Amino acid sequence: RGFPLRHLPLLLDTTAVSRNPEGFDSPGKVLHLAARAHGYDIFIYIFFGSPKPSSAARAAANMQLGKLYLPT
């Protein structure tokens, strides 16, 4: 409960800025995405190497999110 209902493909547009998770030290921007899709609760961290990711880096992250496959 509490995970927002989303449809695949997941996109960066639905992420929120996050702090580094415990045990990780990232110099760049960290985002997190919470979703409920196909009966699964999903929580994903996205790490960028820069505090201001380029549009190419954001596009690459969206492409990777688009590859997420969940069995039904």
Image (tube, rainbow, N blue to C red):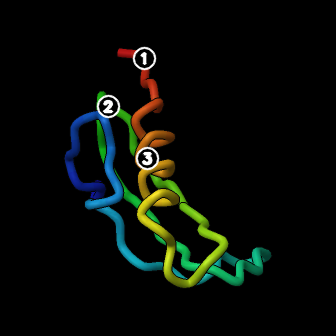
Residue position marked by numbered label 1 in the rendering: 71
11 relative to 70 in the view: left or right: left
- In the image shown, does 22 or 26 lie closer to the viewer? 26
- In the image shown, does 38 or 12 lie closer to the viewer? 12
1 and 3 marks in contact (CB < 8 Å): no
Q: How far from the left and from the top, in percent, is residue 49?
A: 66, 72
For residue 14, the mark is none
Above or below, 42 against 56 in this view is: above
Q: CA distance from mark 1 to mark 2?
A: 9 Å
Residue position marked by numbered label 3 in the rendering: 42
The image quarter containing residue 48 is bottom right
Are there few (<14), some (14-19), or many (20+) residues within 10 Å of tag 3? Answer: few
On-image quarter of the C terminus: top left
Number of numbered discs overlaid on the protein picture? 3
Residue position marked by numbered label 2 in the rendering: 39
19 relative to 24 in the view: left or right: left
Q: CA distance from mark 3 to mark 2?
A: 10 Å
